[in-house]
Amino acid sequence: MKVGDTHYRSIWQDTATGEIRIIDQRWLPHEFRVVTLETLDEFATAIRDMWVRGAPLIGATAAYGVALQMARDPSDKALNEAYDVLHATRPTAINLRWALDELRATLTALPADQRKAAAIAKAAQIADDDVETNRLIGVHGLEIIKKIATTKKPGEAVNILTHCNAGWLATVDWGTATSPMYHAMEAGIPIHVWVDETRPRNQGAQLTAWEMVGNSIPHHLIVDNAGGHLMQHGQVDMVIVGTDRTTAQGDVCNKIGTYLKALAAADNNVPFYVALPSSTVDWTVHDGVKEIPIEERDGREVTHIYGRLEDGSTGFAQISPDGTPGGNPAFDVTPARMVTGLITERGVAEASAEGLLALFPERRSAA
Ligand code: MRU
């Protein structure tokens, strides 16, 4: 998507130098910083400390991290080291393991002298595929928005609530939850987006809101607790969120607080959609609540908040007393029964084993 007049992806290879660059998301929306990742440790830190974040982008970044390692040392030992170091960075988003498995399968089949070129080509392919996948999610999601616009809101804006950032910054481009919104804008369908702030890291306030401003999408930032009230008063026509891992049965693990939005949506008959590339489905997991590892992050993310002061300086403020520890589970699981549909690159699936397998029949043998 565009930042000012320049088209950016969230990660890319510089064509002149071959270096891998990212948008360092920690400083948005107040500062737009691009950094070059030069070592395996830097790739791992960028994922762990959320310079980049969002399931598809975590996967693409890990793929480029392996490529960098192969350029330096194409041995099996170096490949396994890169896999292990990158895999240990964040536990919940399954795209990380998916991308690392893709790289390892491609590279182990090759002699060492072919691995450097093959690794960077594979990483670039994962990034390019992610862009196309998310574009297609937008095309399918647009049909849902169109239907609501014509049947329920003729002449009025469709109100969409979203949680966290499942935008282009969380993917390589387009985003998952935001892709249908960008497509709706392009199609001239009026929309308005309720952006959950998404404590504790405020991905909604800092990243999704920045994307909305950058793409001139009408929106309001709301506190995480406002969604249920808005739904009770008919001010939300649909919810679209992303996901970090979706089970073979359609349970959806996403940013903490998603489950509460799904409960409120179910109580108010508001359609609750999840947008995802199929690389986010973990076909080996069946019960999301019991089986998906939930990342526990530093309590300081809860007790401190990042922002810009009125004098223009940026920094962290402590919002709780000295001595109060923060508890910080980063994700929760929304059971499939609360999900109206899964918007994938192949179309909209019912959130169930049969629904997913109908769109991805090649997975039947593994089920
Ligand atoms: O902790 P984060 O910021 O990596 O969590 C991101 C989310 O939960 C997103 O909603 C999810 O990855 C979907 S991104 C397309």
Image: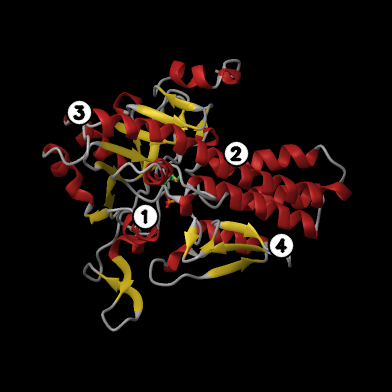
Camera-nearest residue between 74 and 352: 352
Q: Is residue 314 above or below residue 305?
A: below
* Residue named by callout 3: 269
User: Residue at (47%, 27%) from the top-left corner?
Assistant: 347
Q: Is residue 258 above or below residue 339?
A: below
Mark 4 element type? loop
Q: CA distance from mark 1 to mark 3?
A: 25 Å
How crowded pointer 3 is (Cα within 10 Å; few <14, some 14-19, many 20+) is rated as some
Mark 2 element type? helix
Residues tagged 4 and 1 counted as in contact (Cβ below 8 A): no
Q: Report whether the residue tagged 1 is closer than 8 Å to ligand 1.
A: no
Q: Amino acid at mark 3?
A: Asn
Q: Amino acid at mark 1?
A: Thr
Camera-nearest residue between 12 and 289: 12
Q: Report whether the residue tagged 2 is closer than 8 Å to ligand 1.
A: no
* Residue named by callout 1: 208
Of labels 3 and 4, earlier in sequence is 4
Mark in the foreground, 2 or 3: 3
Q: Amino acid at mark 2?
A: Trp
* Residue named by callout 4: 15
User: Residue at (46%, 35%) from the top-left corner?
Assistant: 139
